[in-house]
Image (cartoon, rainbow, N blue to C red):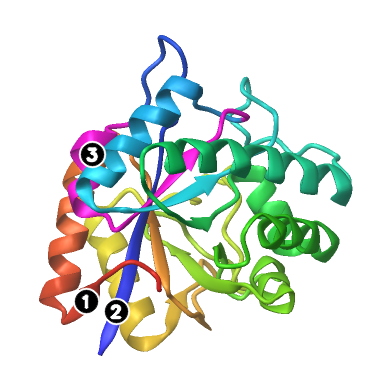
Amino acid sequence: MYKIDINCDMGESFGAYRMGTDEEILPFVTSANIACGFHAGDPSVMRKTVAAALAHGAAIGAHPGLPDLAGFGRRNLDITPEEAYDIVVYQVGALSGFVKAAGGTMRHVKPHGALYNMAAARRPLADAIARAVYDIDPELTVFGLSGSELVRAGEAAGLRTAHEVFADRTYQADGSLTSRREAHALITDAEKAVQQVVRMVREGVVRSVQGHDVAIQADTVCIHGDGAHALAFARSLRERLEEAGIAVKPVK
């Protein structure tokens, strides 16, 4: 049977600034990646987002990023593997406290933005992140770009891993995501995005911007909750996956 987890980055509001539509999207996703304060989020937002995720039965994960609020964690910072270890332990530990206080269990860790992309390509950083996750809780699952160094590092560390794919991003011939700096990085046509996900799950391939099919493993698909039509897309994707005979369930 075909199956996939739908994950969404959440808890990215900060102070008086609201981002995303977490409450509205939660009914349509199965995993929530909650920001931990470095690229977005704050203690109150973390607490409220954990409570909302638990209320909707979504699997909770930490979403640690680079210490870059102004750049939303999307700017590369020249950090060492040791620094990567420290910032991941710090952030995952913070969210873990809120999850435990609410009577829940944290299930996974998914790095955010530039930290995620750097770890996908740089094994020393990936190893440091995987070690940080293992040292906190070896039962956690690491989410990483499908086929990336982060997934391989998680496996080498003895962690469960989930190969992540993206509904609204285009792919390069090597299986990497097209840089957001490129004009064609995002898929804005909801129907094309849905078709891309269904094909990745059912056929195990994705069409690159160069026009070639690239083999890909799809354990979990990321959707973004901060777009203009995010809620409509989340609802449509969930419905279309189930219509295609694809079960939507959290990663085990």
Q: Which tag is nearer the camera, tag 1 or tag 3?
A: 1
- Of residues 147 and 134, the one nearer the viewer is 134
Q: Quadrant of residue 138?
A: bottom right
Disc 2 and disc 3 in contact, CB within 8 angstroms = no
Badge 1 vs badge 3, beta-carbon distance below 8 Å: no
User: In this rendering, is residue 227 above or below 154?
Assistant: above
Q: Which mark is residue 3?
A: 2
Q: Earlier in the sequence, mark 2 or mark 3?
A: 2
Q: How many marks do you count on the picture? A: 3
Res. 79 in view:
yes
Quadrant occupied by the C terminus: bottom left
Residue 126 position in % (x across, y down): 75, 61
Q: Do the numbered discs 1 and 2 sit on residues whose CB atoms are within 8 Å?
A: yes
Give residue 245's position: percent from left, percent from top: 16, 82
Q: Could you tell me which residue is drawn at 45 percent across and 12 percent down?
A: 15
17 to 94, vertically: above or below: above
Give the mark nearest the N terminus, 1 or 3: 3
Foreground mark, 2 or 3, reads 2
**In the image, which disc is placed on residue 229?**
3
Tell me which corner region of the image, top left, top right, bottom left or bottom right, holds residue 112.
top right
Give the residue type at disc 1.
Ala
Gap in angstroms between the C-alphas marked 2 and 3: 25 Å
Magenta-highlighted residues: 20-38
Q: Is residue 6 left or right of residue 209?
A: left
Residue 252 colored in magenta in the image: no
Q: Residues within 10 Å of mark 2 (few under 14, many from 20)?
A: some
Say whether residue 169 is left or right of residue 202.
right
Residue at 19% across, 61% down: 238
Q: Which residue is mark 1?
A: 247
Is residue 30 in the magenta section? yes
Left or right: residue 80 compared with residue 226: right
Task: Look at the image and tell me in which quarter the N terminus lies.
Answer: bottom left
